[in-house]
Image: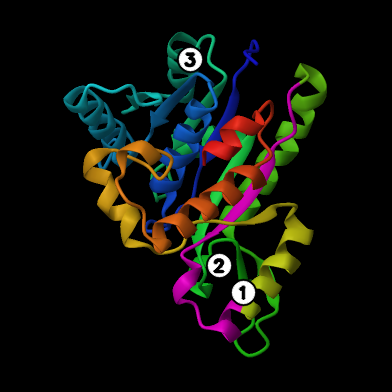
Amino acid sequence: MTTARPHRITFANEKGGTGKSTTAVHVAVALAFGGRRVVAFDLDHRQRTMDRYFENRAATAAKRGVALPTAASHVVDGLSPEDFEALIAREAAGADFIVIDTPGRDDALARHAAAETDTLVTPMNDSFVDFDLIGQVEGESFKVRKLSFYAELIWEARLKRSKATLEQQRRQMDWVVVRNRTGYTEARNMARIEKALTEMSRRVGFRVAKGLSERVIYRELFPSGLTLLDKGHLGDLGTSHLVARQELRGLIASLNLPGLAPTSREAA
């Protein structure tokens, strides 16, 4: 599937604690399991959670003497957009997919990464605190009142991208809002959020996908760098783990990534 320009997947949200890095790692590894060459760039040089996950994964592979499908990972610190594009051209030449994890704050390079991406993934917790990043709702009716700054930013980026799509034969940007950690949301509140997201998606043009629930397994796997896809290295899987794998399988399928073979979706 290798093309002149790898398909870029950027995980972006100006709020922390939404499972952004965990989701990015699992998507990257799922693609690697499918035989794709994946190169990852961690723009959060302070926490570098995604890069640390891949470091732990490499250490586990070396310690156990096994080959674990993975991504080549790079931490990006203090680069201009132009220098970042040069880094991508150098390190991701011949890659099938580029996975970019951005910091949970407003950042110039993160804005650039979002504007240049092919698939923009915005994880959010199922709460109106997180929804406020995309749109503001009325206090009593919960109807969407107006777009928030982040949604306006992405809207403008998509308009610019539409021009580039025509001039440079680029892909249209696909914006996917992923609802993570839905397990602790009260049913009535969940329904309100779903209604607000549906209304907002029609106005702004994003898709909504179900993500990863709040499960201890995701935190437990970080030190080893293993993922739910590493079936042969996790030992006995309990019911919760199996359900989590099913969640991941659904998330990968919902992203509709180009050239993703059925085997890579089944691996999840």
Q: Secondary structure at mark 1?
A: helix
Is 196 placed above or below 265 here? below
Q: Residue flagged by tag 3: what amino acid is it?
A: Ala
Furthest toward the right, the residue is 166
**Labelled pair 1, 3 in contact (Cβ < 8 Å):** no
User: Between 184 and 142, which is closer to the camera in this rendering?
Assistant: 184
Separation of marks 3 and 2 at Cα, in angstroms: 34 Å
Q: Nearer the viewer, mark 3 or mark 2?
A: 3
Q: Which residues are magenta?
A: 170-190
Q: Position of residue 40 (x, y in %)?
A: 42, 27
Q: Quick one: 128 or 55, which is closer to the camera?
A: 55
Say above or below: 40 vs 134: above
Mark number, residue 92: 3
Q: Are marks 1 and 2 in contact (CB under 8 Å)?
A: yes
- The image quarter in which residue 70 lies: top left
Across and down, in percent, residue 13 comes to 48, 51
Above-or-below relation of 131 to 10? below
- According to the picture, the residue beneath numbered tag 2 turns out to be 131
Q: Nearer the viewer, residue 207 or 210?
A: 210
Residue 114 in sight in this render: no
The residues tagged by marks 1 and 3 sit, at their Cα atoms, a distance apart of: 38 Å
Can you identify the residue that label 1 sits on?
193
Residue 171 painted magenta: yes
Dot 3: element: loop
